[in-house]
Image (cartoon, rainbow, N blue to C red):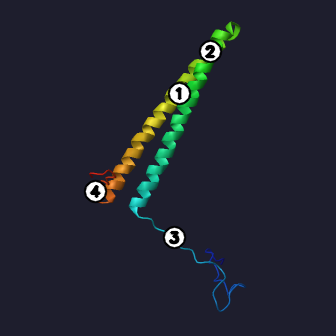
Amino acid sequence: MAHLFHHKEKKEESEYSNEYGSGYAEQTTVVEDDYEKYNKEEKSHKHKEHLGEMGALAAGAFALYEKHEAKKDPENAHRHKIEEEIAAVAAVGSGGYAFHEHHEKKEAHKQAEEYDGGEKKHHGFFG
């Protein structure tokens, strides 16, 4: 009768083995504490917020450019107006994304403060 289960055979000494070890680096994992995790998350949201702001700025500028082109080029005015509206929608969407990331950043900041003991750090003269 055939053997139904496949057992992995134990590997013998590797060709890289010697009296100093097996030749493979030992893997270690770095566990960061929650405060560092929340600070990284806050930085990430801040970066994404800035990207959203830049997207809104670029799309808004393109919408204004298309508005100008619609006046300047009456033959293709309809096409320019459509592109202007699409760019305006993109600007609003990008602004909404920046607003969302701003609130996510604030939430991560609150979590970092809570983990750090809830004490707010004051950087002024009187605080």
Identify the residue shown where x is 34% and y is 50%.
Answer: 110
Give amino acid for label 4.
Answer: Glu
Report x, y in % for residue 87.
58, 24
Secondary element under disc 3, as helix, strand or loop, is: loop
Identify the residue shown where x is 49% and y is 69%.
Answer: 30
Which mark identifies residue 91? Answer: 1
Q: Is residue 11 above or below residue 30?
A: below
Return the residue at label 2: 68
Give amino acid for label 1.
Answer: Ala
- Which dot, 4 or 1, sits closer to the camera? 4
Identify the residue shown where x is 65% and y is 92%.
Answer: 19
Q: Tag 2: Cα neighbours inside 10 Å, few (<14), some, or many (≥20)? A: some
Q: Position of 11 compared to 124: left or right?
A: right
Q: Is residue 97 above or below residue 123?
A: above
Task: Using the numbered discs, state the Cα–Cα distance from disc 4 to disc 1 in whole angstroms.
Answer: 38 Å
Give amino acid for label 2.
Answer: His
Give amino acid for label 3.
Answer: Thr
Identify the mark nearer the N-term, 1 or 2.
Answer: 2
Identify the residue shown where x is 64% and y is 77%.
Answer: 3
Identify the mark nearer the N-term, 1 or 3.
Answer: 3
Q: Is residue 88 above or below residue 108?
A: above
In the rendered image, the quadrant that contains the N terminus is bottom right
Task: Using the numbered discs, state the Cα–Cα distance from disc 3 to disc 4 in whole angstroms.
Answer: 30 Å
- Nearer the observer, 12 or 6: 12
Q: Quadrant of residue 103?
A: top left
Return the residue at label 4: 119
Q: Are marks 4 and 1 in contact (CB under 8 Å)?
A: no
Q: Tag 1: Cα neighbours inside 10 Å, few (<14), some, or many (≥20)? A: many
- Nearer the observer, 40 or 72: 72
Report x, y in % for residue 46.
47, 45
Q: Are marks 2 and 3 in contact (CB under 8 Å)?
A: no
- Which dot, 2 or 3, sits closer to the camera? 2
